[in-house]
């Protein structure tokens, strides 16, 4: 079926076997029943290479005087030293935006929400205005301009189509070149309420758009991809829950025998499904030591069963706004240390390249925050503000243990 928003009516015009074809730049193509919407990208600048892969004509081909030649946009790689893998949890208010950097390559996981502009010098947007101010950058774009060398993002992942995860995709793709965009092919439960969100998605620009179906993930037909030496594998969702949060993409990142779990807004039911999927396919979640907490710390996620499947000494990071209640913080602190962007600002986790360890630094961090269990393991999970600020070095130095006990207790 074809939905024409300019005239706001439905009509049967596209045969079932033609649903993957594009309807043009102004129309959206859907497969519709009582509860489901299957969305297909309508970009006129893309051609269908396979059922799940769409490539940009302009990026793929160039007309020369001699012939039409295939152009590979990937730059020749130079041998660079592996200096560690940095994970930046950007403080964008109520929303998610994560920058991963390794060996000169970058990945972005989600693109924040309206608060991305409120965090930027107090700017805000009208409630129903989906047009981004061309004269102002969000805090996400500003942060990436400071931390990304060049303007190429190797991989961008949209976990699900909620506004607080994709609102800044338009402005971001205006400032950075996205080589590969990954997202789930089928979205459920929103019906036509989500049409404004689809307008945001239409503004995304990438060289290649890759779709995954739930069945692809369940059967492990999705190819893993690398960003530098960091490997990403998509392990969820594996059951159609008819809810955008429950159908969030779940990514497991591996680097130097350490694992990081990115969960989007996955629900407790989705967590149980992922646990079963990992057990069936011998995916060890016990090695996960860093968890991006789902759904901004809400009690709809992070069940005790799910947390027990992860590593004993977790470092949990929560992307949330000041108004978010983060009801799971108390439970999470039983498992390890917790960082919140609403309190700590931008959070940076540096995975070290030669030892199985990592450092956590935050924008507003005043001291090391470590549980006693981590101190016994000899890990260093925080950089003291005194170490990074020469003006504070004259302050009396307390022991790491004293400092950690005081802050973790608080």
Image (cartoon, rainbow, N blue to C red):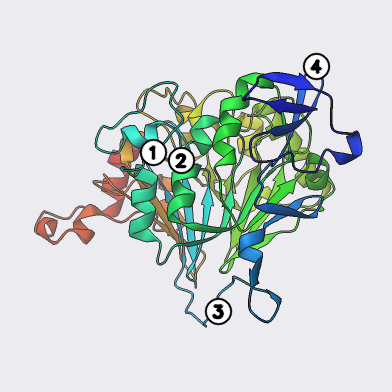
Mark 4 secondary-structure assignment: loop
Structural crowding at the residue carrying mark 3, measured as other residues with C-alpha within 10 Å and reported as few (<14), some (14–19) or many (≥20): few
State which tag comes first along the sequence, 3 or 2.
3
Instruction: Determine which residue is flagged by label 1.
Output: 92
State which tag comes first along the sequence, 4 or 3.
4
Instruction: Count the marks.
Output: 4
Q: Quadrant of the N terminus?
A: top right
Relative to residue 129, is residue 118 drawn left or right?
left
Q: How far is disc 2 from disc 1 in space, using C-alphas?
A: 10 Å
Q: Quadrant of the C terminus?
A: top left
Does residue 267 appear in the picture of this structure? yes
Structural crowding at the residue carrying mark 2, measured as other residues with C-alpha within 10 Å and reported as few (<14), some (14–19) or many (≥20): many
**Residue at left 45%, top 28%?**
330
- Answer yes or no: do the residues labelled 4 and 1 have beta carbons within 8 Å? no
The quarter of the picture where residue 301 lies is top right
Relative to residue 16, is residue 10 drawn left or right?
left
**Residue at left 43%, top 26%?**
129
Q: How far is disc 3 from disc 2 in space, using C-alphas?
A: 29 Å
Mark 2 secondary-structure assignment: loop
Mark 1 secondary-structure assignment: loop
Instruction: Determine which residue is flagged by label 3.
Output: 77
Relative to 273, residue 352 above or below: below
Q: How far is disc 4 from disc 3 in space, using C-alphas?
A: 49 Å
> Residue 395, position in %: x, y?
10, 54
Structural crowding at the residue carrying mark 1, measured as other residues with C-alpha within 10 Å and reported as few (<14), some (14–19) or many (≥20): many
Instruction: Determine which residue is flagged by label 2.
Output: 168
State which tag comes first along the sequence, 2 or 1.
1
Q: How far is disc 4 from disc 1 in space, using C-alphas?
A: 35 Å
């Amino acid at each position: 079926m074809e939905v024409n928003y300019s005239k706001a009516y439905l009509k049967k015009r596209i045969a079932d076997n033609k649903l993957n074809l594009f309807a043009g730049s102004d129309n959206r193509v859907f497969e519709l029943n009582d509860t489901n919407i299957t969305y297909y990208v309508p970009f006129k600048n893309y051609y269908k290479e396979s059922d799940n892969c769409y490539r940009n004509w302009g990026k793929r081909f160039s007309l020369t005087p001699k012939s039409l030649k295939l152009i590979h946009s990937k730059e020749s790689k130079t041998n660079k030293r592996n200096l560690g893998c940095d994970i930046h949890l950007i403080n964008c208010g109520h929303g998610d935006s994560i920058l991963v950097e390794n060996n000169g390559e970058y990945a972005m996981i989600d693109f924040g929400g309206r608060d991305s502009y409120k965090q930027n010098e107090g700017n805000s947007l009208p409630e129903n205005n989906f047009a981004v101010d061309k004269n102002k950058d969000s805090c996400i774009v500003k942060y990436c301009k400071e931390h990304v060398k060049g303007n190429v993002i190797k991989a961008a992942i949209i976990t699900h189509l909620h506004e607080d995860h994709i609102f800044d995709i338009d402005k971001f793709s205006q400032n950075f070149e996205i080589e590969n965009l990954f997202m789930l092919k089928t979205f459920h439960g929103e019906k036509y309420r989500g049409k404004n969100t689809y307008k945001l998605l239409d503004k995304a620009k990438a060289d290649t758009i890759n779709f995954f179906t739930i069945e692809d993930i369940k059967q492990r037909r999705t190819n893993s991809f690398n960003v530098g030496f960091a490997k990403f594998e998509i392990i969820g969702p594996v059951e159609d829950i008819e809810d955008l949060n429950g159908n969030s993409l779940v990514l497991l990142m591996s680097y130097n025998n350490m694992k990081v779990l990115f969960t989007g807004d996955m629900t407790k039911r989705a967590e149980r499904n992922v646990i079963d999927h990992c057990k069936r396919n011998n995916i060890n979640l016990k090695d996960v030591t860093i968890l991006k907490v789902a759904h901004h710390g809400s009690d709809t996620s992070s069940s005790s069963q799910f947390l027990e499947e992860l590593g004993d000494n977790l470092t949990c990071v929560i992307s949330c706004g000041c108004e978010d209640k983060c009801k799971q913080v108390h439970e999470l602190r039983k498992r390890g240390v917790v960082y919140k962007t609403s309190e700590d600002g931008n959070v940076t986790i540096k995975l070290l390249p030669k030892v199985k360890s990592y450092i956590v630094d935050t924008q507003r961090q005043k001291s090391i925050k470590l549980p006693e269990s981590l101190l016994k393991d000899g890990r260093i999970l925080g950089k003291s503000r005194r170490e990074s600020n020469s003006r504070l070095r004259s302050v009396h130095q307390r022991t790491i243990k004293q400092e950690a006990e005081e802050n973790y207790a608080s």
